[in-house]
Image: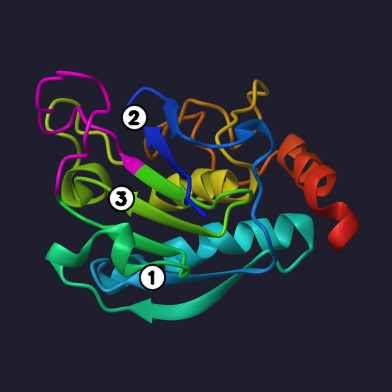
Amino acid sequence: MVVAVLLLLLTLGGCGFAPLNVEGDSALRFDRLPIHYKISSSIPSEYHEEIKAAFEEWNTATQTQVFVFDGFKDLQEDQLDPAYTWDENVVLATNQIGNIDAPNAPPARAGTGPLARTFLKGATAIRDADIYLFEFDSNYVRGRPETGDVYSIRSVVLHEAGHMLFGPDHSTDEASIMTAQLYPRGHEKEKLTLGDVDISHFFEIYGNEL
């Protein structure tokens, strides 16, 4: 069976997606809970707890074991590719600039590419998801070249974890972590917790299986 791949693109100003051969993407969901995930060796150890906190927020808010930390994945820089992480749901970091999915698009400049990209894989349901954190030092440590904005790994992973559960759709509720807009650290609209709409949506999709 041909594996369908869905690319979710998180940009500086918001979040978009470019589906590729996905059947019924509006109904996409992970095929089983809990979702076991790993943290790549490409992510410095001082950021591990922030990543775990993002996944744990889903557990706490839903009072359900949605995500389970499953250890670390040892990857070299030339192995930061979904082919090396099938069925392991890995969070990875790279200082590379994220690709822009547009025909004849010019190369992205530092600080203008996507913050993160999640690869969702599965033919009829999501079976694997890998979260890539791009331009790691600029986006999450030092600050973007032109603005100085530093983004919270917890906020980004919290949002991307929602795409692991729900597929590419975004919420129009400004209280939701699944809105298309994410904000840097310290911004009054920065989201570090789930909204009521996120919890309700989770139980609408998975409630009968819990």
Badge 3 element: strand
Name the spot of residue 210 as percent of width and height, x first.
Answer: 85, 64
In terms of sequence position, does the residue under pointer 3 or pointer 1 come before the other? 1
Q: CA distance from mark 2 to mark 3?
A: 11 Å
Q: Is residue 105 magenta?
A: yes
The amino acid pointed to by label 2 is Thr
Q: Which mark is residue 39?
A: 1
Magenta region, mostly helix, strand or loop? loop
Magenta-colored stretch includes residue 147: no
Q: CA distance from mark 3 to mark 1?
A: 12 Å
In the image, residue 14 sits, relative to residue 10, either above or below, namely above
Label 2 crowd bin: few (<14), some (14–19), many (20+), radius 10 Å: many
Please give the residue where the numbered disc 2 appears in the rendered image. 11
Q: How many marks?
A: 3
Horizontal relation, residue 179 to residue 44: left or right: right
Residue at 59% across, 28% down: 170
Q: Which residues are magenta?
A: 96-116
Label 1, secondary structure: give it: strand
Q: Which residue is mark 3?
A: 133
User: In the displayed structure, does residue 60 sit left or right of residue 88?
Assistant: right
